[in-house]
Amino acid sequence: MSSIITQLSAAMESKAQDDNTVVELPEDAPFDPAQREWLNGLLTGISTIAAAAQGAKEEAPGTPLAIFYGSQSGNCEVLAKDLKKFAATQGFEASVGELDSTDLAAMAELNHVLILCSTFGEGDPPDNAKNFYESITSEGAQLLPATLNFAVCGLGDSSYAYFNKAAEDIARRMAELGATPCQDFLGCDVAFEDEYAEWKTEVFQTEVFSSAAGAASVQAGASDEYTPEFDKNHPFIANLIHVESLSGENSAKCVNHVEISLAGGGVDLEYQAGDVLGVWPLNCPDDVNAILQASGFTGSEVVSLKSGPASLRVLLQSKMDIHTVNAKSLETWGLESAPEGYQVLDVMSELKPEIDAQTFLDGLRPLQPRLYSIASSPNAHPGEVHLTVGEVHYDIFDKPRKGVASTWLGKRLAAGSNMGVYIQSSAHFHIPDNNDAPLIMIGPGTGIAPFRAFLEERESRGAAGQNWLFFGDQHEAEDFLYRDQINAWQESGLLTKASLAWSRDTAEKIYVQTLIRQQGQAFYEWLEQGGYIYICGDASRMAADVDKAIRDVIKEQGQLDDDAVQAYMDKLVAEHRYQRDVY
């Protein structure tokens, strides 16, 4: 009898793996034909039901989860996609969208929501989260049900006064409006990877998420979306080809054109005009020496990071932010406060904390890559990427200071030298596939960078659409970046209009927003013809002034009231015809 049971078990297991398998009693089973037929039918039915139940279990969908992000530079967008993959391994089937793709009414219908949002400028939300932020922080915001379970992770920079304000406001207001926080708000600093990884794990371990989880994806974390090999934590080792100054000898600025070889990177370093290049810089040896001298360290002290031990000098040179001082720095060094604007050198020189080398290192933030708008089209420069980089020079407390990456690229890095780079896609800042669409590009100073790429791309496509460039700086003679190329595009007809603003060449200061207002009729006509607006540059001043000028033109030329102007702008944004790369 035990032999019969063993054979039946094997047959039923085979049936569970192959629906075509027929379960039958062994030939030598002690049953007459009628009994055999009845039992064979019974066993086949039981095994079919079991196989169907097993298949249903394996194919059961995960629990719905909505992931929303607000991202200016792209980091939160990258994390949102990572969170979607991780959610699949935890029994959730996630959708990903910008915060402005939803509203409170739609969110009230959801049960599980995760939000990733950055903060930039003076505590402002990213462009693709503005409408949602304004609606949720308004006094008359719609209430949310307690059945909406949520968690919020913010990305910010602790050296700014409004650290993580936008994300924290969203988290606070969602709770005030009635939604249920399943995890405390997390506000990450610039080195966010470890904190974010811990946060996402803890979210899915909360009772409200773990109890609601469906079947985990069979291919845990699998995604149809292509993931490049090189990223922030795994950069490609590129080579510097060439650097040349774009500024005149008498310019108050020093702007460089930087060419970098991506040879050997293959498809993992493919980019589009409008994307961003992440660059890992090295600190200036002179700055490292000054800090070591001020702090009384030799640089040969052995200290440790998570990656292991190394000499203090090596880590200061290549791994640590040797300028920024924040609250954590002061606390680690045993200091209650420091004068506003103090950098690491000032603290070590003036306040002289009595600390050892390891404690000093523990108070520093990790060095971060710099993100630069790409100034080239891959079709015009195969295997290369170009940047437009303004060197940063300034004084604090009568001491000269300089930017880390901008001066490294412009002055300290020799041709042929290696550098770690990666491509960060900017899905929100690409030219349309429609080659007939008119483009209006507004980018004074180094804001010209992506528009050089746009024009090279339109040229390589043979695009028939009109192109209008607003560009300017202080002096035409000294600060006309890419003068020869822009003039050539005007002569060829690729550049339909070039509106140039030189703020210091006339008694009255002329800026790009001045020209937008002066040429308002034509500007509005381009919009009415389906034109796309692109803005690149400083967020707090230039971009805000340009936005105001555009609204004034729409109001005047369209004879609209304020509500209608806002509706017009919302339509441009919804149609991806108003895009900004601002910082």
Image: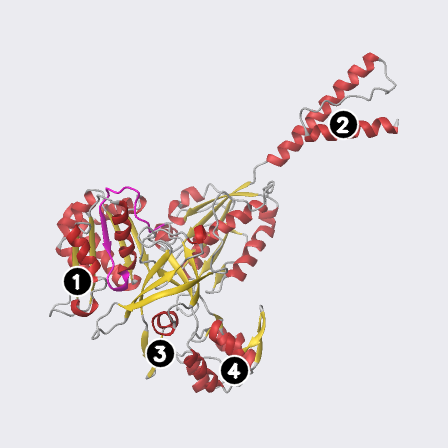
Q: Residue furthest left?
A: 507
Q: Residue at x 56, y 40 (%)?
A: 62
* Cα separation between marks 3 and 2: 78 Å
User: Mark 3 or mark 1, which is nearer the start of the sequence?
Assistant: 3
Q: Quadrant of residue 518?
A: bottom left
Q: Dot 4: few (<14), some (14–19), or many (≥20) neighbours within 10 Å?
A: some
Compared with residue 13, is residue 422 higher up or lower down, i.e. above or below?
Answer: below
Q: Main secondary structure of the magenta part?
A: loop
Q: Quadrant of residue 101?
A: top left
Secondary structure under badge 4?
loop
What amino acid type is highlighted by mark number 1? Answer: Ala
The residue pinned by badge 1 equals 501
The residue pinned by badge 4 equals 299
Percent x, y for residue 32? 85, 13
Residue 196 seen from this side: yes
The residue pinned by badge 3 equals 401
Position of 442 with respect to 286 (left or right) is left
Q: Dot 3: few (<14), some (14–19), or many (≥20) neighbours within 10 Å?
A: some
The residue pinned by badge 2 equals 11
Secondary structure under badge 2?
helix
What amino acid type is highlighted by mark number 2? Answer: Ala
